[in-house]
Amino acid sequence: MHGGGTSMVYNIDDYLNEIEEYKGNHYFRGQADISWDITPSIFRNGSTLATEYNDIAETYLNSEHKHILLKLLKMQHYGSKTRLCDLTVNPLVALFFAIDGNNEKDKDGCVYILDCSDRLAINSI
């Protein structure tokens, strides 16, 4: 993985060794299928703008949160489709999402590692 490449790991020790240099200055995203693009849920599986609007309107009107980003985070947490994409600073959380449910699938999961310096400003969402 060094220098932006790809590495395959087959056990937790290899994973921990591989991600050691990335702790503290990177975001991680785990996905259960390596073939998936990093795509917010609103753009997956035929989601429509009307569905997004209805979800946002319902949450916005019924939420105690004053800030729209907090409302969107709450919506995503409870399963609504949003334009947000989950990232974590904890590589073990990302690993969980990469392997969760893979016993039933014949797919490799993956963990994306993103440099924090590449992040977007919060108001660009």
Image: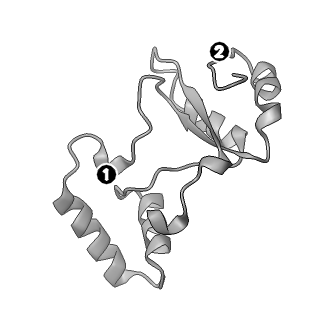
Q: Residue at x 57, y 36 (%)?
A: 30
Q: Which residue in the protein does label 1 denote?
A: 42
User: Seen in the image, is 89 located left or right of residue 119?
Assistant: right
Q: Residue at x 82, y 24 (%)?
A: 17
From the image, which quarter does the N terminus lie in? Answer: top right
User: Identity of the amino acid at label 1?
Assistant: Ile
Mark 1 and mark 2: Cα distance apart in space:
29 Å
- The percent coordinates of residue 23 (x first, y second) are 79, 41
Mark sitting earlier along the chain (1/2): 2
- The percent coordinates of residue 102 (x first, y second) are 51, 24
Pointers 1 and 2 in contact (C-beta within 8 Å): no
Other residues around mark 1 within 10 Å, as few (<14) / some (14–19) / many (≥20): some
Element at badge 2?
loop
Other residues around mark 2 within 10 Å, as few (<14) / some (14–19) / many (≥20): few
Question: Measured along the vertical axis of the image, is residue 103 above or below residue 27?
Answer: above
Task: Report the number of numbered marks.
Answer: 2
Q: Which residue in the protein does label 2 denote?
A: 8
Q: Which mark is residue 24?
A: none
Question: Measured along the vertical axis of the image, is residue 35 above or below residue 117?
Answer: above
